Amino acid sequence: MNQDKLALDVRSVSKMFGRRQILTDISFTLKTGEFLLIVGPNGAGKTTLLKILATLLSPGSGDAFVSGFSVKKNPTKVRERIGFISHNHLLYRDLTTYENLKFYGEMYGVKDLDARIDELLNMVELNHRRYDTVRNFSRGMFQRLAIARALLHKPEIMFLDEPHTGLDPHAVDILDGMMRDMSSTTTFVMVTHHIESTLSLGTQALILDEGKIQYCSDTGIDLERFRSIYGKVCGRGIEHDCD
Amino acid sequence: MTAIRQGWAILRKDLLLEMRSKEVFTSQFLFVVMAMVIFYFAFSPNIKNLTTVGAGMLWVAITFTSLLGLNRSFVHEKDEECLDGLLLCPVDRATIFAAKFIGNFFFLTTLEVIAVPIFAFFFLTGTFLPNLGWFLLILLLGNVGICGVGTLLATISMNTRARDLLLPVLFLPVMVPVIIPMVLATNYIFTQGESMSELSVWLYTMAIFDIMYVVAGYVLYDFVIGD
């Protein structure tokens, strides 16, 4: 993997919802293979930023380039290269585990889909539930299946929006294990409130408050500065969740 | 080929979800049958030949029944924000429109396969049978118009809190240019069943508006389904 290649290049992105300014002049870059943590209080614009990078929202002004492709001009190329996990699992409740993965696999044009589904279901330990409709799954099982869904097409960049929310310890272990295993080949951008437990994963960090960047690491996280700014923005230390 | 594969995947998923839940078909079937029964008992004591009001009754029942289905056509996508999952896929938005349009068309046509014979039992005599082919063409053209504009407007109303109210408010006025020729053409078939020259005017009108609505949906869908 070319570590010098930019996975993300965000250039002066701003976004308004109605008259409300959600993001103001956000600019930063992220190299391939890095793990970026985006933190900040509720309403800071973290999820909006992630949705713009994932092409679910369009930037009001500015542009962002994901693996070199503009989210404005080449959204389809961007979508081919990203995976997205949020606290909503994005799965159809009346389809089985296999049917959900089969549907998304066909949408992404995954080759040798059945073998890939087998591999992922073994990874998230849901192979024994492959023909069960997911309606009655627990929160942790949903999230494990959501991980499999997001990884189907072997994305270059993973966007994670508070992925640990509501997970049982086993599902947290699977998620964290997956991120560690993939960290050498995949770029991660994670919005999180669980700073204490995820700081060990991150190689870069970005603190947002009221739609503006308060801290953005460049060559690794300066823990002292990060703690200081985080404390000011959230009014508490990193051992506490910022929400 | 990619668009066809993706469109088929969306369509097959929607068919599978409807086969499992049967939510849309059951509610549509009950509504259309009840509407016909009520119309029959309301009109039969006063009107000797029900065929003369049959066209209006048929399209009132089908139009309002279709609204039930259109309102529910995105219900699975709203559940757990599955729409975001769909939008994250590298799929052209026009392909999503095409798949949803074909799905809605299939559900409505399937409903009519059952509902129209029931309607014929209540309202029609056998005089229209020589023009059965034209009648089926009118039904198909009507369905294309309803599903073309309905799929687009259901997508617009999907993200609003009052979507059950908003869809009819948007849909019915826009559908007037198709509904009027649908009713007139159907009435022509039911009551005269001979000369086809006047009928062709209504058929062309329906076809033109169908094309306009489907093309508009196909072209505008990217703007409608985005933020």
Image (spheres, coloured by chain):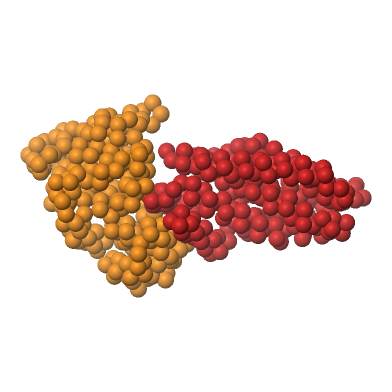
Quarter of the figure that contains the N terminus of chain B: bottom left
Q: Nearer the viewer, residue A45 or B215?
A: B215
Q: Is residue A239 above or below residue A102?
A: above
Question: Residue A240 falls in which quadrant of the image?
Answer: top left
For residue B175, side relative to residue A80 (left or right): right
Q: Which chain is red?
A: B
Question: Residue A217 falls in which quadrant of the image?
Answer: top left
- Counting from the top left corner in percent of width and height, residue A148 is at 32, 61
Q: Is residue A112 above or below residue B27?
A: below
Question: Residue B25 falls in which quadrant of the image?
Answer: bottom right
Furthest toward the right, the residue is: B48
- Counting from the top left corner in percent of width and height, residue B192 is at 88, 49
- Counting from the top left corner in percent of width and height, residue A6 is at 19, 44
Q: Which chain is orange?
A: A
- Counting from the top left corner in percent of width and height, residue A86 is at 32, 50
Q: What residue is shown at x 33% (from left), y 52% (from top)?
A: A80
Asked whether residue B197 is in view, the answer is yes
Count of all numbered marks drawn on residues in the image: 0
Quarter of the figure that contains the C terminus of chain B: top left
Q: Nearer the viewer, residue A136 or A98?
A: A98
For residue A45, side relative to residue A185 (left or right): right
Asked whether residue B150 is in view, the answer is no
Q: Nearer the viewer, residue A231 or B79?
A: B79
